[in-house]
Structure formats: structure tokens, C-alpha cells
Amino acid sequence: MGSVSFTSMLANGCRSFSAPVALVRTLALTHVALSEHANNYKHVKVACFSRSSKKRTTFACESLKQGVTQPTSVSSVNGYPEYTRLLPCPSHNGPPRVEHLVVSEGGPVLEYICKTLDLPPQFVADLIHFGAVYYALVCPKPPPTATPEQMRVFKEVTAPSVLKNRASIKGKTVREAQKTFRITHADEFVEAGTYLRVHVHPKRFPRCYDIDWKSRIIAVSEEFVVLDKPAGTTVGGTTDNIEESCATFATRALGLTTPLNTTHQIDNCTEGCVVLARTKEYCSVFHGKIREKKVKKLYLALAAAPVPTGIITHYMRPINVAPRLISEDFIERWSLCQLEVMECKEIPWPNAVVEEKYCVEDCGWPSKDYAYECKINLLTGRTHQVRAQLAACGAPIVGDSMYMPAAVAEMESPGLNPFGQYKKHYTTENDKETAVAEWIARHGKEPNVAIGLQACQISWDDGKHTFEARAPWWRCQ
């Protein structure tokens, strides 16, 4: 079988944990559709294939993140680590590697990927089980950074004269045929012209194997399960890993035969109450309650500076990329963000032992004598909302390695934030865009495990259902 590969990306994005992985769990049969998430890269290697040859040429380009160690020290001739299985889970993430292929000869997907990428069958089977392999009937358009050769191949395989002969896409528009879906079985047949995206190095969540999941279950009913989510875990999975998730491990801990469904999200670095639906029907019901604002969420936030009580209002840029930028002033088409600080009390800053236990990062805050525990009623539910709003108030969350560095920079040089209290007047749009880019660069990476944020209570139906999480990690000293 031959292949066409547009790009092979390698990127650095470390997730480290203090505790070693002690247990190896069997894979669970869970397949959940998830949206894609953008990756930030420091060193990206691009490998290109041609139709007539599998000779690989590699070159590097720069981007944004710190280097990390490969999952294994043994390397194969092509510069990648030697592959065996996805389990046991490594304690650190390796650089992401994503391969984009166009099938030139039909056959079983596992066999095709093994031969094309020189990967062992059991490893590819694991990737498929983790939800790390996608297909589309027609290759999506490459990004603007694509090379002329990649664009040539794309035009060749999507030419109308080629597509009209493919029975599988008759009755579909090209846009419909370019929609990607997960490969769910290793023996699925892929026809010539099918696009494949293989996440060879899925993002891993080693903390899943260290948790006593039964002890994290708050409530179980016929319709839902309420979980006290640990920090450093994902609620429903990621684009390339639906196995190492709260939904999967909670399903397994309860011995359920039907996988639990995700009804809402909280950040990986946040702990606390999460509702998982036992049926797809209740998942839809709960989504409706969220839309109708019948679900109330209370948070405990450990801020680095005092926060005034009352309602805080900002507006968030409608771009689905971190960091989330917010403005104190109304900007057209930006999303309203509101939270209510119900109380704020001074407590000792967590000691070094506790911070090390929960992998809380030192983000350069100048004073660590006291922190401020805030009880927050979340009035709107935007991604990173509490984190971004408190940072904009000069009171970033303890351990928030993404937003605290920017807050420190603004504190030291007021006016760096082009949307903040001390924003400057820009004479041209180009100057404004430059200032925004520089402000984004002041932010750091996503936290490794825990930050000072807990979803401490969730309730719905006017309090008929009310559930609380255990004490937050910073009180466990």
C-alpha cells in the first residue's frame, strides 16, 4: 500500500506529576465524540512523503514551549522513539506527533497505518482504542502553512474528476465529505482517497492511575453520577485520548456497563463537582437546564491578592484559543463574563510541602505570606472565566502558570494589557495588534496539575439537587 502524508508534526508540551504511576489498568471500551483543541509548539518537525517514495526529509522550525524528554530513551532510525504499547502510562508527556495521510490503496485501517508509519499492530490498536485516529472521506484543505507540494497533492486527490468516481461520497457536498470522525474499530476498511489523521503521541493523564475513584464519587442516581473531580484530569477526554478521563474511570469504578456521558466541563487543573449523565437522554436534559440557567455553580478560588466582594463584569474575546483575553470595557461581539464574589478571607499561603504534593507551580508572585480564599457564584460560564477575571483584577489564582505571569507583568509595568485599566491609546490598528500579540506572549503555559480553584458546589432545580465537594487541596495541610 502507498500513502500520501501532508505533515508530521512534533511538538513539546510537558505535563509532569510528582507521584509515579503505580497501576496499569486495562483499556475500557469507550468512544465519545469530542471537539478539537489547539496545541502550542516550540520545536515542530515536518516530515513529507511523496506518492512515489517513502523517503522522509526532516527540518525544524521554532515556536513556543519548553522542551521535554521523550517517553523512551530508545530511538529508531527515523528519530522517533521505539514504539510498543500505550500502557503503562508514562509519568511525563512526550512531544505530540500528528500524522496526516491520504490512503492510496484501500484496506483495513490498522494494517494500513502500521505499514505506512512503521508502527507495531498492538500500538496502533491502542491508538484506535484511545480515540486517537480520525478519518474523512475527502481530505480537508491544508492550512496556510502548507508547502507547494502538499497543496499539489491536495488538489490532485480532491479534483472533481477524481471525486466523481467515488461512490462513497455521492449525495454529499465536499464540505460534508471533509468532516472528520473517529475510527472506532481496528478492522475498519478505508478506501483509496480517504484522509487519515493519526495522533501518534496522544496527551496522557498519569494521575488517573493514582486516584481512588470510588472515594471521589459524591452521589449516584438512576439518571446521573456526581463526581469530585481530581485536579490534573480531564472530564471527558481530549481530541486524542478518551480513555484516560474522569468519565471512563468513574464508569469503571462503579462497574457500569454503559459509559457515563459528559454534561459540562471544568478545566483539567480545576478540581470539584462534575455531573456525569448515565443516559444520553439525561445528558440532553441537563444541557437544557444549563441553557435555561437552572444550574448554579459555586467555586472556591485561592487568589494571590484580595478581591472585593460584589459582581465583577468583563467581556471575553470570542476566540476559542488560550489565553482568554478579557476587557473591562464593552467591545462589540465580545462575550459577557460575570461572577459574584460572595466572600473573601485571608488565609496562609500553602506551604511548600502541600504545593509540591499537588504540583502547584511557582509563577513568580512577589509575596507568599498570605493568600485569599474567595467564594464565587459563577453567573456566566465561559472557559477560563474565573481564572481570567481574577487575573484581570490583579489577583490571579495561586499556581495558575498561564495567567499569573501576565498579571505580574502588568503589575510591574502598568499599561501592558491593551484591554486593562491602564490601557494605552493606540494611533493605528497595527500598533494595537502588536500590543495584543505582546500581551498574549506575557502569558505562560497551562498548569501541570492543580491550581487554587475548586468547583465546590453544584445545584439545580432550585436546590432540589445540591452537592458539595470535599475540602480543597490547600486546606489539606
Image (cartoon, helix red, strand yellow):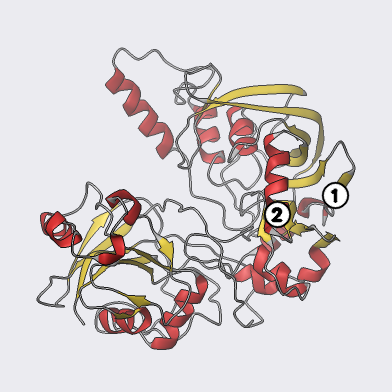
Q: CA distance from mark 1 to mark 2?
A: 24 Å
Query: Along the line of sight, which residue is nearer the eye, 296 or 263?
Result: 263
Numbered disc 2: secondary structure? helix
In the picture, the quarter occupied by the C terminus is bottom right
Answer yes or no: is residue 410 visible.
yes
Q: Residues within 10 Å of mark 2 (few under 14, many from 20)?
A: few
Q: Which mark is residue 436?
A: none
Where residue 153 sits, quadrant-wise, is bottom left
Q: Position of residue 38 (x, y in %)?
A: 42, 51
**Left or right: 436 as drawn, with respect to 194:** right
Write the residue at 90% across / 42% down.
464
Numbered disc 1: secondary structure? strand
Query: Along the line of sight, which residue is nearer the eye, 365 or 284?
Result: 284
Where residue 50 sits, quadrant-wise, is bottom left
In the picture, the quarter occupied by the N terminus is bottom left
Amino acid type indicated by mark 1: Glu
**Left or right: 159 as drawn, with respect to 40:** left
Write the residue at 80% across / 46% down.
456
Q: Looking at the picture, does residue 318 appear above or below residue 82?
A: above
Which residue is under mark 2? Answer: 281
Q: How many marks?
A: 2
Q: Position of residue 362 (x, y in %)?
A: 59, 50
Write the residue at 31% across / 12% down.
427
Q: Which mark is residue 468?
A: 1
Q: Position of residue 162 (x, y in %)?
A: 15, 62
**Left or right: 267 as drawn, with respect to 410:** right
- For the residues labelled 1 and 2, say whether their Cβ atoms are less than 8 Å apart: no
Amino acid type indicated by mark 2: Glu
Q: Mark 1 or mark 2, which has the lower sequence index?
A: 2
